[in-house]
């Protein structure tokens, strides 16, 4: 991605508060003293068989970037690539209905969309949200001493791939599907009451890829207590066999930035590189408020939320995995 964006002119507009050069979740554009737009787009190929569920996952995933910035989703646009002639129109209809269900749940308004003929089915959304210009959570605010909280279990990439390869059944993946269709809304709504310094959502770069963006943006080190990191059923067994595809790329790309203590379980270490779809929020919060935030998240139904590590002054830009 870095190479694809190389040489693109940097915007000089002073109302662009967060642009693509900061590797953050969404762009933020100020429109008044008290209001800014949060804008993001995400789409991908199906990761489950059921079209309605796929639509719901894609929408939860697209909405997530707005929540990760601290914004409130306002409007949504559908984007679809569809192999007309190969698939029945009802399939697209079910995908759109699934997406709509999550847009509705977010209190967001669907305003339109666009579909193109495409040999490979794809679906996603562009989301616009609102945010106060002084209350944006970027990757850059984590401070030494902060505690790290993760709000969803890891393993959706490994589980989706194993399902595609017929290694897991529909029943095996139910927990992952439930997690991927859950909005980060409840988690995001708790954050304004706490001294949160940085936040991002965990998607294609895996926990450690997004953590590395936070470590670099904040010029701090991040330490992970790997045993505390919540994992989906079957994900550790799968991770023990190693990673493939984009997750393996994450591992290779991040290797120079990650130190792994000898006693860390190898499957667990692998899992932290697994590419997630519609993953949870990674939150850096002042240590004094960490327990209260965790308690509040759980009370609001964010059951998987866990304290998984801390921010250090040492080793800026680097990640350390402890047992
Ligand atoms: Co994101
Ligand atoms: Co995104
Ligand atoms: Co953010």
Image: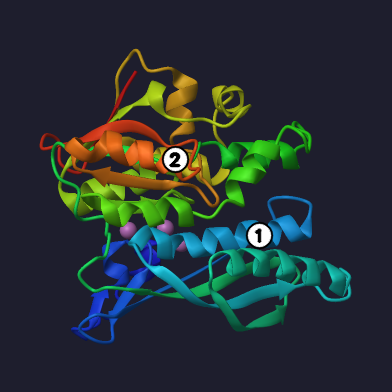
Q: Tell me, yes or no, whether the two marked residues, 2 and 1, touch with CB atoms within 8 Å.
A: no
Q: Tell me what residue is drawn at x 24 percent, y 80 percent.
A: 34
Quadrant of the image containing the C terminus:
top left
Q: Nearer the viewer's eye, disc 2 or disc 1? A: 2
Q: Tell me what residue is drawn at x 77 percent, y 59 percent.
A: 51
Q: Which residue is nearer to you in this view: 59 or 194?
A: 194
Disc 2: which residue = 299
Q: Position of residue 165 (x, y in %)?
A: 75, 38
Estimate how packed mark 1 is, as few (under 14), some (14 to 19) or many (20 or more) residues with alpha carbons within 10 Å.
many
Q: Quadrant of ligand 3?
A: bottom left
Q: Tell me what residue is drawn at x 58 percent, y 29 percent.
A: 235
- Residue 320 vertical placement versus 170 (above, below): above
Instruction: Answer with left or right where residue 5 lies relative to residue 115.
Output: left
Q: Position of residue 224 (x, y in %)?
A: 31, 30
Q: Tell me what residue is drawn at x 54 percent, y 65 percent.
A: 106
First in sequence: mark 2 vs mark 1: 1
Disc 1: which residue = 56
Label 2 secondary element: helix
Q: Which residue is nearer to you in this view: 107 or 94?
A: 107
Residue 55 occupies which quadrant of the picture?
bottom right
Q: Which residue is nearer to you in this view: 22 or 302?
A: 302
Estimate how packed mark 2 is, as few (under 14), some (14 to 19) or many (20 or more) residues with alpha carbons within 10 Å.
few
């Amino acid at each position: 991605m870095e190479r694809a964006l190389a040489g693109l002119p940097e915007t000089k507009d002073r109302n662009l508060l967060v642009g693509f050069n900061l590797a953050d979740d969404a762009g933020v554009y100020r429109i008044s003293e008290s209001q800014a737009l949060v804008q993001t787009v995400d789409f991908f190929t199906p990761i489950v068989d059921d079209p309605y569920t796929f639509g719901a996952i894609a929408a939860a995933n697209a909405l997530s970037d707005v929540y990760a910035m601290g914004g409130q989703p306002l409007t949504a646009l559908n984007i679809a690539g569809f192999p007309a002639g190969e698939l029945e129109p009802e399939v697209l209809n079910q995908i759109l209905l699934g997406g709509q269900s999550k847009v509705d749940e977010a209190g967001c308004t669907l305003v339109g969309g666009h579909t193109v003929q495409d040999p490979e089915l794809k679906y996603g959304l562009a989301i616009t949200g609102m945010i106060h210009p002084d209350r944006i959570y970027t990757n850059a605010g984590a401070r030494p001493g902060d505690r790290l909280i993760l709000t969803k279990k890891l393993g959706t990439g490994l589980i989706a791939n194993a399902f595609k390869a017929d290694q897991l059944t529909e029943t095996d993946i139910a927990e992952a599907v439930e997690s991927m269709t859950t909005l980060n809304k409840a988690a995001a709504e708790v954050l304004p009451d706490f001294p949160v310094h940085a936040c991002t959502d965990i998607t294609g770069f895996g926990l450690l890829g997004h953590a590395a963006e936070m470590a670099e943006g904040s010029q701090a080190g991040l330490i992970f207590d790997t045993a505390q990191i919540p994992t989906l059923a079957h994900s550790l067994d799968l991770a023990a066999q190693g990673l493939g595809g984009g997750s393996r790329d994450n591992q290779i790309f991040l290797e120079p930035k990650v130190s792994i203590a000898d006693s860390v379980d190898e499957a667990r270490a692998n899992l932290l590189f697994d590419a997630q779809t519609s993953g949870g929020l990674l939150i850096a919060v002042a240590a004094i408020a960490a327990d209260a935030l965790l308690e509040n998240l759980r009370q609001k139904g964010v059951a998987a939320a866990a304290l998984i590590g801390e921010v250090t002054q040492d080793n800026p830009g680097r990640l350390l995995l402890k047992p």
